[in-house]
Amino acid sequence: NAGVMQNPRHLVRRRGQEARLRCSPMKGHSHVYWYRQLPEEGLKFMVYLQKENIIDESGMPKERFSAEFPKEGPSILRIQQVVRGDSAAYFCASSYQRTGLNNEQFFGPGTRLTVL
Amino acid sequence: GNSVTQMEGPVTLSEEAFLTINCTYTATGYPSLFWYVQYPGEGLQLLLKATKADDKGSNKGFEATYRKETTSFHLEKGSVQVSDSAVYFCALSDADYGQNFVFGPGTRLSVLP
């Protein structure tokens, strides 16, 4: 059973370009979470999606950032007009049910975004 | 709101030394508590968890006990190895607060041979 997959693993963009990060959850998981990790910091929650729905986007910047989880295909985190401050590692996690007492989140290897 | 505080690193130990990484939390509900480990260049892996007071999570020689009275979940290992060098994150999940995790800032551990 493959784990959570993210691609690309490394992404380099110039200021003003768009970045698209993909996440394929574990088989059978319909709940996806995106986190951002700035250098030398912990993970910060960005957005929680369930198939075709955004459940909680309280941690996502209001501008330039968007996320989707279509019925078919991976979840996409999209950053428009990237700036240097967007350079970070972006982690995706998935769970079978809503995270709770016995439903842990499984993390992907992350996408390291560098904005030049 | 909910939060997690961890001891600041980096922590440097010699092989076979005793490890403690402190973690305390603030939560409005009754959270589940977790320790995740991140090896260099990789994502987070669940190390252990506890879902109610006085529960002890354990894995790979690591242990942590859910202490409700002190709102703590300290990570311990009796004898560390070089391969334990990584960043350790304490986290909580509170169904009353939301379905996402709240992570501590992480503690970097370096074990020297």
Image (spheres, coloured by chain):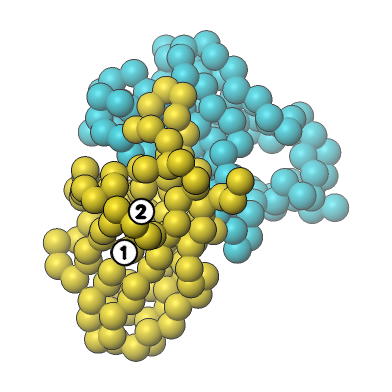
Chain colours: A yellow, B cyan
Q: Amino acid at mark 1?
A: Leu
Q: Please indicate, yes or no, whether residue B4 appears anywhere in the rendered image.
A: no
Relative to A31, B39 lies left or right: right
List x then y, in percent, for residue B112: 79, 53
Q: Residue at x 42, y 22 (%)?
A: A101
Name the element at disc 2: strand
Looking at the picture, tell me which residue is in the foreground, B22 or B54.
Answer: B54
Rendered view: A104 above or below A66: above
Location of residue B43 (image quadrant)? bottom right
Q: Residue furthest front?
A: A72
Chain designation of label 2: A
Residue A34, label in figure: 2
Asked if residue B32 is positioned above or below residue A65 in the image, the reply reads above
Residue contact between numbered discs 1 and 2, judged by CB atoms under 8 Å = yes
Instruction: Mark 1 or mark 2: name the one nearer the start of the chain.
Output: 2
Q: Is residue A16 left or right of residue A23?
A: left
C-alpha span from label 1 to label 2: 8 Å
Q: Amino acid at mark 2?
A: Trp
Residue labelled with disc 1: A77
In the drawing, what numbered circle is on residue B10? none
The residue sitting at 22% across, 63% down in the picture is A66
